[in-house]
Amino acid sequence: MSELRWNPVLREWVITATHRQERTFLPPRDYCPLCPTAPGGFETEIPEPDFEIAVFENKFPSLRREPTEPAVESHGMYEVRPSSGVCEVVVYTPRHDTTLAEQSVEHIRRLIAVWTDRYSELGALPFVEYVFIFENKGEVIGVTLHHPHGQIYAYPYVPPIPAREIASARDHWERTGECVHCAVIAQELTDGSRVLVEDGHFIAVIPFYARWPYEVHILPKRHLGALPELTNEEAWSLARALKRVLVGYDQLFGFSMPYIMALHQAPTDGEDRPYVHFHLELYPPHRTADKLKYLAGSETGAGSFINDALPEEKAEEMRRVLPVEGEVE
Ligand SMILES: [Zn+2]
Ligand SMILES: [Zn+2]
Ligand SMILES: [Zn+2]
């Protein structure tokens, strides 16, 4: 059972997805559904002995191409819609005990090609308005499978955080004639104290307004709205910048850093939005090696983040461990 329920108070959709309770939860390694199926072995989601990157539809989707009937009908101010959309799983590698940070720049470049393909194909579906590519990594983030993988949710609406970013980008564009992200990039490059990586076409920065201690944003210097607009050169630059940030994360505390990675791109609802600037955001929950930041009263109840670290100091700390240009392969 799955449906979309409208919250008229916050003006946003909530997805109910009760069937997800039966999801596979941290299976033993021999029963990993994301490993290639071994000859004569347990049948996984991938009936191939080997692959480079695999994409398939999530077995426990919150959104479906052919959604089930909602459990209740719209009534009064409570609007209900079928939960149409697509949920995909992107398996980064056939190897179980590794991470995206450990993949080569070439493999990350291949992943960017997969993301681009999925963005275009899912975005072209008539019921899809926003293609959201993300990764939840680490048990503290709540992952249910250890095998390195990301996910894609193709929503039938523009979800709240991208919608809010887009609304402010539009407002900034209309008032000043410039893109808010291009302006942020220019200001960060002039200042320099929070910049982690400058790789030709992309920069990685702990933004001035970071909400998490080690929050990193990776942005193309050229103004563009979505992955398909990247040139080959730019895609390589993104692969190198992402690799350096991920390796830097792992070198901070000497363990594989958990994080949430989110790609923010132009919606695919057919509307032209020249003010959208593609970027990737990473939010690791760690404040220190053994302390996590929890979303507590101010963050969850009021939506106001408290960052107990200075982005300038965290950027300095990260720059000390980041691989230098040309050091990653
Ligand atoms: Zn596995
Ligand atoms: Zn821009
Ligand atoms: Zn964003």
Image (tube, rainbow, N blue to C red):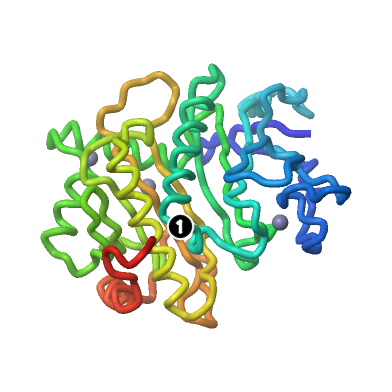
Residue at image coords 48%, 54%: 261
Instruction: Tell whether circle 1 marks a residue whose Cβ is less than 8 angstroms from ligand 1.
Output: no
Dot 1: few (<14), some (14–19), or many (≥20) neighbours within 10 Å? some
Question: Would you say residue 211 is visible in this rendering?
Answer: no
In the image, residue 92 above or below residue 271: below
Q: Place residue 68 in its image quadrant.
A: top right
- Identify the residue position indicated by label 1 in the image: 104
On screen, residue 156 versus residue 229, left or right, reads: right
The quadrant of the rendering that contains the C terminus is: bottom left
Residue at image coords 62%, 47%: 91
Give the secondary structure at mark 1.
loop
- Circle 1: residue type: Ser
On screen, residue 52 versus residue 244, left or right, reads: right
Q: Place residue 155 in its image quadrant.
A: top right
Q: Position of residue 98 (x, y in %)?
A: 59, 63
Q: How many marks?
A: 1
In depth, the one of 185 and 72 nearer the eye is 185
Q: Position of residue 217 (x, y in %)?
A: 34, 56
In the image, residue 84 above or below residue 182: above
Q: Place residue 74 in its image quadrant.
A: top right
Question: Would you say residue 10 is visible in this rendering?
Answer: yes
In the image, residue 51 above or below residue 252: above
Q: Position of residue 223 (x, y in %)?
A: 22, 38
Q: Position of residue 277 (x, y in %)?
A: 29, 39
